[in-house]
Image (cartoon, rainbow, N blue to C red):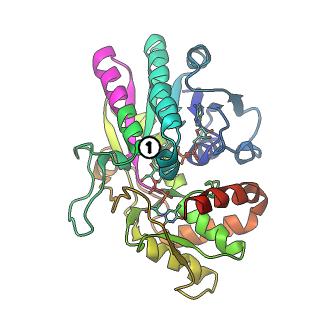
Amino acid sequence: MDRLLVTGGAGFIGSNFVHHLVEHTDVAVTVLDKLTYAASEASLAELPRDRVELVVGDVVDADLVERLVGEHDAVVHYAAESHNDNSLADPSPFIQTNLVGTFTLLEAVRRAGTRLHHVSTDEVYGDLELDDPERFTESTPYNPSSPYSASKAGSDHLVRAWVRSFGVQATISNCSNNYGPWQHVEKFIPRQITNIIDGGRPKLYGAGLNVRDWIHADDHSSAVWTILNHGRIGETYLIGADGERNNLEVVQMILTHFGRPADDFDHVTDRAGHDLRYAIDSSKLRDELGWHPRFGDFATGLARTIEWYEKHAEWWQPHKRATEASYAARGQ
Ligand code: NAD
Ligand code: DAU
């Protein structure tokens, strides 16, 4: 594999993946990205130009996608509208990008016979009770709650159908909540870190008892690279790093890092349809492909992430005011 097309490579996880490829492989990367509000060219700015090319364009543009797919050995598909709160305010771009975009890509790889890895989310499985001893596995039934997770569930079904009906050479991964550098300040962890740096307080939805299963974005990247190279065609692999924490605990870990009192946060309006708990059993990926996370310790990974935001205010500050204004308009 010499040339890889990465859709959504100017977003949070896609840009972490491109950094991972430059550091750990020899492949040349083309990023196809529409540069929505969630993207940042600056996330790719320090990468060598002879290894990484950015094509600004839309994954629903069939002619562009067909040309780019034809020029590459494989495609990793990250491009998506990714934020649940935005999908509640306006679902339409989620249907367009996540469903029509994935369909457009599938038709292109079908015609070209190109290998595809589709990046998806554990949210397609709905949520778990706090005391449920089971975690999500590859055989958990789909039960998405939000317009975002429903659109990702639909995109997974499209990939599965194109594998079965047309023999498309694709794999799918469903990963838990990512944290790390270059994550937009609309998301939970960067929002709380940057609120504190800006002199404000963390904002907790509801009581803060909802549980997320945190994984560092670099571990997500190594898992995707492993599946792309060694995964069995047509298979789904769940990616997770045993990082379950409730939101209150995470806010208090961030407050402690800054030397602030553990109750120095605001409770704000809860998210409609808010999923209670996600938890991933990644045994298949570990046992079959030998993958292991490098950031086993969430506390260490979180501390490094906080330090990254402290050092890179010029990266996130331009987005902070508008993001907080739209949260404030929703009482969040
Ligand atoms: P993000 O919102 O940070 O980045 C998405 C990127 O896709 C942006 O660069 C954006 O410009 C681009 N994009 C959006 N619409 C596009 C279009 N029509 N054409 C081309 N590019 C377009 O998202 P993220 O958090 O990095 O998530 C990336 C992928 O990983 C998504 O598919 C998401 O569902 C999945 N995922 C995310 C998480 C998480 O915790 N963030 C966990 C599991 C899976
Ligand atoms: O599980 C994977 C998913 O993780 C991905 O598919 C999504 O793309 C990604 O955005 C993320 O979804 P969540 O909805 O879990 O992430 P978010 O960062 O929006 O919220 C995490 C938790 O924190 C959730 O329980 C809501 C809560 N929250 C969020 C924000 C922004 C707060 O309590 N306060 C906040 O200010």
Please tell me whether residue 159 belongs to the stretch shown in magenta. yes
Q: Where is residue 2 in the image (x, y as percent from the top left)?
A: 59, 26
- Mark 1: few/some/many CA within 10 Å (<14, 14-19, 20+): many
Please, is residue 113 above or below residue 86 in the view? Answer: above
Three-letter amino acid code at disc 1?
Tyr
Residue pushed farthest top?
A: 111
In which quadrant of the rendered image does the N terminus lie? top right
Ligand 2 within 8 Å of the CB at mark 1:
yes
* Residue 130, horizontal then vertical, whole percent: 27, 68
Residue shown at 46% from the left, 11% from the top: 111
Q: Which residue is drawn at 30% across and 48% down?
A: 125
Q: In the current view of this chain or complex, which residue is farthest to the bottom? A: 261
Q: Answer with left or right where residue 28 lies relative to residue 244.
A: right
Say left or right for 146 vs 139: right
In which image quadrant can residue 169 be found? top left
Is 155 left or right of 200, judged from the image as shown? left
Q: Which of 223 and 255 is in front in this view?
A: 255
Q: Position of residue 321 (x, y in %)?
A: 72, 60
Task: Ligand 1: give its quadrant.
Answer: top right
Residue in the foreground of this view, choosing between 131 and 207: 207
Residue 259 in view of the camera: yes
Quarter where residue 330 is shown: bottom right
User: Residue, x 57% and y 84% (percent of image)?
Assistant: 264
Q: Name the residue under label 1.
A: 148
Which portion, as a residue range, is magenta? 156-177
Q: Is residue 304 visible in the rendered structure shown here?
A: no
**Viewed as shown, does residue 185 lie left or right of 144?**
right
Residue 164 magenta-highlighted:
yes
Quadrant in the picture for the C terminus: bottom right
